[in-house]
Image (cartoon, helix red, strand yellow):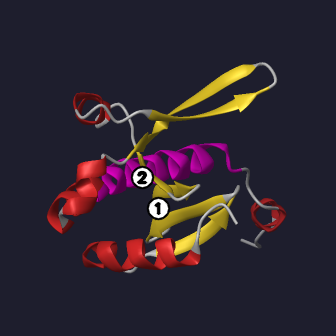
Amino acid sequence: MAVSKDYLDWLCERLEPLGPITPRRMFSGAGLFIDGAMFGIVLNDTLYWKSDALTAAQFDAADCAPFSYQKKTGTTIVAALRKCPDEAFDEDDLLLDWARLGLEAGRRAALKKAARKARTKKPSAKASRAKKVKTKP
């Protein structure tokens, strides 16, 4: 298993002040979700926070490396996931501050995804039939 249950339980307990956390198995790790928004992921017992254009500078300033993995064609870098700084594990408040950055980015990503989905959603067959129904004057 790429993420230990003990580590995941410990992490969720420390992050509990943010709200009810739902860990979901994904890839070879576990995503961390609050209210359906993914704000972090644990891979190989390493914690990564969700990042975006609004939080990237803070992660850069703390030297938080982006998640990367090897493929046959070379290294793939996922800039939207940043490693949690080691010192954040020493103090709960600091860990929660980094988690909040991840949660903000995760919520923005969820809103963008929902907006894209709403724009591309086609009318259902039932809605199309409803438009064709003629009423008597």
* Dot 1 amino acid type: Ala
Residue 19 can be seen, yes or no: no
> In the shown orientation, is residue 106 left or right of residue 25?
left
Name the secondary structure under disc 2.
helix
Residue located 75% across and 61% down the image: 131
Q: To which residue does mark 1 refer?
A: 37
From the top left corner, tell me how far across and down residue 45 is, in percent: 52, 59
For the residues marked 1 and 2, what is the alpha-carbon distance in whole angstroms?
Answer: 5 Å
Residue 95 can be seen, yes or no: yes
Q: Are marks 1 and 2 in contact (CB under 8 Å)?
A: yes
From the top left corner, tell me how far across and down residue 15 is, in percent: 32, 72
From the top left corner, tell me how far across and down residue 23 is, in percent: 54, 72
Residue lying furthest top in this view? 73
Q: To which residue does mark 2 refer?
A: 106
From the top left corner, tell me how far across and down residue 57 is, in percent: 26, 29
Q: Give the range drawn in magenta.
A: 99-121
Residue located 34% across and 36% down the image: 64
Q: Residues within 10 Å of mark 2 (few under 14, many from 20)?
A: many
Name the secondary structure under disc 1.
strand
Magenta span contains residue 117? yes
Sequence-wise first label, 1 or 2: 1
